Amino acid sequence: MLLVAAMPRDATTVAVTAALTLVAACVDQPDAVNESRVESAVVGGTAAQTGEWPDAVAVLGTSGTCTGTLIAPDLVLTAGHCAGITPQQVIANTIDYSQDTGVRVHVAKTTAYPNWQAAYDVALLELASPIDSIAPRKVGTRCTFDNFTRDTPVRLVGFGATDMAGQAANTQLKQALTAVTDPECTGGNGCKKAVAPGGEFVAGGSGEADSCFGDSGGPVYLDTPAGAVVVGAVSRGVDGSATPCGGGGIYVRTDKLVDWIESTSGKAIEADPCDTAHSADRAMGDDTAGCSATHGSGLGAIGLALLALRRRRRT
C-alpha cells in the first residue's frame, strides 16, 4: 500500500497526486518525503448554505486555488504555501465560485509568514478595497484554547476536493464537523518541531471528515458562547496516510498569529471576546516573525516540487 506523505492542500496538487497514483501501480515506492500535503474540498462534508459562512473566501491565483478567511474588511488569512499560486482575487459570500455570485475583490499584496516552510504555514492577503458588506470573522486567541482538548468538535469549511483521492474537481463550499485528535500537534504526524507544541493542531481522519486539495488556508471554526470563531488555517495532511485526503489534517493555531497579523498588516483584528485582557493575552503569543516574506521565495525547483506534494491547495 502506498503511504502518502503529508501534502499541502491547495488545488495544484491534484495533478501531481494523479501522476503518483499511476506510478504506484507499477513500481514500489520509497518512503514518502516528510512534507506538507495539499488539500481540496472537504472530504465527508455537506454543502454549505447561502450566507452560512460568508467570510470563507475562495482564493484564485494564476496557478491554482485555495481557501481563506476574511478577518478584517480588507484582510484575508490563508496558507503560506498559497502564496505560491500568486493570488489575484478573492470571492467572499459565495457557495460556488464558478457562478457569478459573491463579492469579488482583487488582491493588492500577499505576505507569507517568514520561513513558513519550517514555521507557521500562513499568509496574509491585503485586498485592493474593503469588503464592507460582510462581517469579518472573530479570531481565536489564547483564552479560546483554554478548553481546546482532544475530541473538541470543530468545523472544516472550504472549496477543496471531496474524495479521499483528492481528484474530484469542486468549486462549491463544503463543510464538515470533525474532532480534534492532537490539540497541540505534539505527535509524530508531521508536526513542525519549530512551532511545537502548541503552534498547530491535528483534526479529522480515520476515514471521516478531512480537508483536502483546495482547502488550503481555509477556516477551522470553533463554536463558542459568542458564536463561531476561526481557530485554525488548513495547512497539510498528516504523514503516513494511505490516501492523499481522509487521514487527518494539520492546522495552524490562530492564537500564535494575532501579534504577527496586526504588526504585519498594520490593522486591528477582532478577537474572540473571551479575551477581556486582549493586549496582555497577545503578549503570550509568538513574537518571532522577523522580516516579512512576500510570495516568490528563493526555494529551488526541487524544494518546491517536494512542498507541492504535501500542501493542500489546488492547481
Image: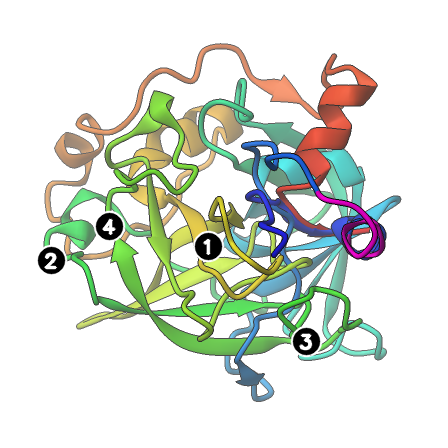
> Which residue bears the numbered disc 3?
94
Examine the rendered structure and indicate whether residue 156 appears above or below residue 257.
below
What's the distance in space between the residues labelled 1 and 2, CA to CA?
Answer: 20 Å
Q: Is residue 264 left or right of residue 285?
A: right
- Graded by Cα atoms within 10 Å as few (under 14), some (14 to 19) or many (20 or more), the crowding at tag 3 reads many
Q: Is residue 52 left or right of residue 94?
A: left
The disc, 2 or 4, on the residue closer to the chain's N-terminal end is 2
At label 1, which amino acid type do we have?
Gly
At label 3, which amino acid type do we have?
Thr
Q: Residue at x 78, y 78 (%)?
A: 101
Q: Residue at x 53, y 79 (%)?
A: 44
Q: Is residue 196 left or right of residue 207?
A: left
The disc, 1 or 2, on the residue closer to the chain's N-terminal end is 2
At label 4, which amino acid type do we have?
Pro
Give the x, y percent position of residue 290: 45, 11
> Which residue bears the numbered disc 4?
183
The disc, 3 or 1, on the residue closer to the chain's N-terminal end is 3
Q: Nearer the viewer, mark 1 or mark 2?
A: 1
What's the distance in space between the residues labelled 3 and 1, CA to CA?
Answer: 24 Å
Tell which of 209 and 264 is nearer to you. Answer: 209
* Residue range corresponding to the magenta coloring: 21-28
Magenta stretch containing residue 26, yes or no? yes
Q: Nearer the viewer, mark 2 or mark 4?
A: 4
The disc, 2 or 3, on the residue closer to the chain's N-terminal end is 3
